[in-house]
Image (cartoon, rainbow, N blue to C red):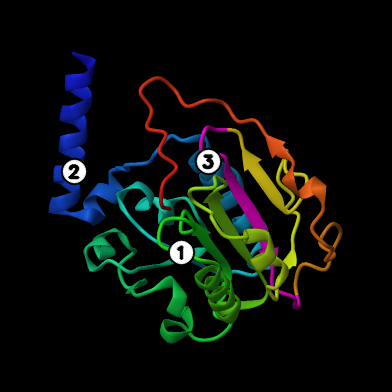
């Protein structure tokens, strides 16, 4: 009976979204996944970006690469002005009106002016479209081009051999970014492993520049401490736990 009620409730949410995404947003509708990696992104990382990514200035901008129904609610979670890009035209309905681009993550500089964002989040691209070392290095270079000096890049990926068959660390070592240890509880370096069966890992990088020169923000090399993990609560009964793209 509960499963039937859940399916009916989900169907009603989808119907309202199809009728009016704006009305669905005002009603607080979302299709979020309750995976530990998503909860960490939505609560901890977004909170940190809101606090520091714009250097304390109003009007900060964040680019989120890849949209679908599961992250459609993200503009409501961030105080930063959220912009989105996705290769699939059919996913444009999930982007914020007037701030979504249909395009490739490997061609960001084609769609956005240089140094136009305070933060870029690329979660779930590696192994789900960005599948080679060359494409990964191009993704990182494109993110660098559109980030303002001092801006933050957050990479999220499943650290499993079938998803990252290339040397991710080698690509990071050649990147123009500095490792960045965010002031997030339980995060002890520039790399953070979420304890779930997908081995989802977040990497925090900073573009050298003006802001972020205070305590704890000095550039340094990647170390073993950057792999420190934090255990998050397991999702509740019946929760969807696909880490997947975005």
Q: Residue at x 49, y 42 (%)?
A: 38
Badge number at residue 70? none
- Secondary-structure class at tag 1: loop
Magenta span includes 202: yes
Residue at the extreme top of the image, as rendered = 1
> Which sits in the foreground, 170 or 141?
170
Q: Earlier in the sequence, mark 1 or mark 3?
A: 3
Tell me if I can see residue 20 in this picture.
yes
Asked which quadrant contains residue 129, the reply is: bottom left
Instruction: Kindly report the distance in space between the C-alpha atoms of the residues bearing marks 2 and 1.
Output: 30 Å
- Judging by the rendered image, the residue that carries numbered circle 3 is 37
Kindly identify which residue carries mark 2.
14
Q: Is 241 placed left or right of 47 in the picture? A: left
234 relative to 100, above or below: above
Q: Position of residue 149 (x, y in %)?
A: 68, 78
Q: Residue at x 81, y 48 (%)?
A: 224
Name the element at disc 2: helix
Labelled pair 2, 1 in contact (Cβ < 8 Å): no
Distance in Å between CA atoms under marks 1 and 3: 19 Å
Compare residues 29 and 124 and report the one nearer the observer. 124
State the extent of the magenta-drawn residues as a range.
Answer: 196-210
Residue 84, placed above or below residue 164: below
Say which residue label 1 marks. 130
């Amino acid at each position: 009976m509960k499963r039937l009620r859940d399916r009916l409730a989900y169907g009603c949410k989808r119907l309202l979204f199809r009728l009016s995404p704006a009305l669905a947003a005002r009603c607080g509708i979302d299709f979020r996944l309750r995976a530990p990696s998503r909860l960490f992104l939505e609560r901890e990382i977004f909170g940190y970006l809101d606090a520091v990514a714009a250097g304390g200035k109003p009007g900060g901008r964040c680019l989120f690469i890849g949209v679908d129904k599961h992250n459609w609610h993200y503009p409501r979670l961030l105080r930063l002005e959220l912009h989105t890009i996705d290769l699939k035209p059919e996913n444009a309905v999930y982007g914020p009106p007037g701030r979504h681009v249909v395009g490739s993550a490997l061609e960001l500089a084609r769609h956005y002016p240089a140094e136009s964002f305070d933060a870029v989040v690329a979660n779930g691209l590696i192994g789900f479209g960005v599948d080679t070392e060359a494409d990964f290095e191009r993704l990182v270079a494109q993110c660098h081009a559109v980030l303002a000096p001092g801006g933050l890049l957050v990479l999220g990926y499943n650290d499993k051999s079938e998803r990252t068959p290339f040397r991710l660390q080698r690509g990071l070592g050649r990147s123009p970014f500095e490792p960045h240890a965010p002031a997030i509880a339980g995060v002890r370096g520039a790399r953070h492993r979420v304890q779930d069966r997908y081995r989802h890992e977040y990497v925090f990088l900073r573009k050298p520049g003006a802001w972020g020169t205070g305590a704890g923000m000095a550039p340094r090399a990647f170390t073993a401490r950057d792999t420190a993990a934090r255990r998050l609560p397991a999702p509740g009964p019946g929760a969807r736990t696909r880490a997947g793209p975005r």
